[in-house]
């Protein structure tokens, strides 16, 4: 089972963090620092598997990672997972990001965090692998994008709210509001 997915840059700044096992926030920060320290000090020509750090479970857990340009993709898994299977899963995830963002970079992870999380949820949910077919994942992302566009997306929500208020059919705007001993005078408001 996958216990955590960590993506951080060459300087150790987290870009995506997903824990599938509960850890306090302080413990999560320590795990991120320790994982970065373990992974970043390794040469590029050595194996991409290593025993988990002391904080995340020691020898019962493995850190499986890939280093692409300025980003480390690290999966922390228990001993039941296949190292090569997880390496392949990392490759599928990165290629899917690359297809969805057209040559993915660190800034895409920063500015499109919601989309990155959606893609990750199509691949892994609750620590279990859901989908490894990149074409199926991309198809689901495209369906989600079409649905967002048809609904106007999150960015259109304020405009829809304003138009809904404008279209409200109020017979008269109250001028004085009396609640018990409290008397509130409402100033004259110009129409929208």
Image (cartoon, rainbow, N blue to C red):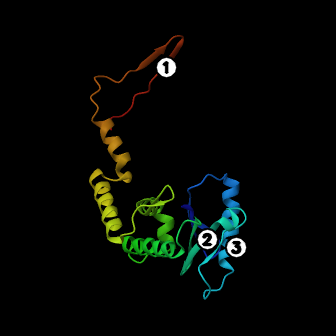
Count numbered badges in the picture: 3
SS assignment at label 2: strand
Q: Position of residue 96 (x, y in %)?
A: 40, 71
Front-most of residues 190 and 98: 98
Q: Are marks 1 and 2 in contact (CB under 8 Å)?
A: no
Residue 177 % position (x, y): 45, 18
**Point 36% across, 71% down: residue:** 134
Quadrant of the rendered structure where residue 16 is? bottom right
Instruction: Determine crowd level at label 1: few under 14, some 14-19, many 20+ residues with C-alpha closer than 10 A.
Output: few
Q: Residue furthest top?
A: 180
Q: Which residue is mark 3?
A: 37
The residue most toward the bottom is 45
Q: Quadrant of the N terminus?
A: bottom right
* Figure quadrant of the C terminus: top left
Q: Residue at x 33, y 58 (%)?
A: 144
Mark 3 packing: few (<14 Cα in 10 Å), some, or many (20+)? Answer: few
Location of mark 2 (residue): 63
In 3D space, how far apart are the residues under numbered discs 1 and 3 (Cα atoms)? 61 Å
Mark 1 = which residue? 184
Depth check: give the residue in front, 64 or 167.
Answer: 64
Question: How far is disc 1 from disc 2 in space, using C-alphas?
Answer: 63 Å
Query: Which comes before the other along the chain, label 1 or label 3?
Result: 3
Quarter location, residue 176 = top left
Residue for point 34% across, 41% down: 162
Q: Is residue 37 left or right of residue 156?
A: right
């Amino acid at each position: 089972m996958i216990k955590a997915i960590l993506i951080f840059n060459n300087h150790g700044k987290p870009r995506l963090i997903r824990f599938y096992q509960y850890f306090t926030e302080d413990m999560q920060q320590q795990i991120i620092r320790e994982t970065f320290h373990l992974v970043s000090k390794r040469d590029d020509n050595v194996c991409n598997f290593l025993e988990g750090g002391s904080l995340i479970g020691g020898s019962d857990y493995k850190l499986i990672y890939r280093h692409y340009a300025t980003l480390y993709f690290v999966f922390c898994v228990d001993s039941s997972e296949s190292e090569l299977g997880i390496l392949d899963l990392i490759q599928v995830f990165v290629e899917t990001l690359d297809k969805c963002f057209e040559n993915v970079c660190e800034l895409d992870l920063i500015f499109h965090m919601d989309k990155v999380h959606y893609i990750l949820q199509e691949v892994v949910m609750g620590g279990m692998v859901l989908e490894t077919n990149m074409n199926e994942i991309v198809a689901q992302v495209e369906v989600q994008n079409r649905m967002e566009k048809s609904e106007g997306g999150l960015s259109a929500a304020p405009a829809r709210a304003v138009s809904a208020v404008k279209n409200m059919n109020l017979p008269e705007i109250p001028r004085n509001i009396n609640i018990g001993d409290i008397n509130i005078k409402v100033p004259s408001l110009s129409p929208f």
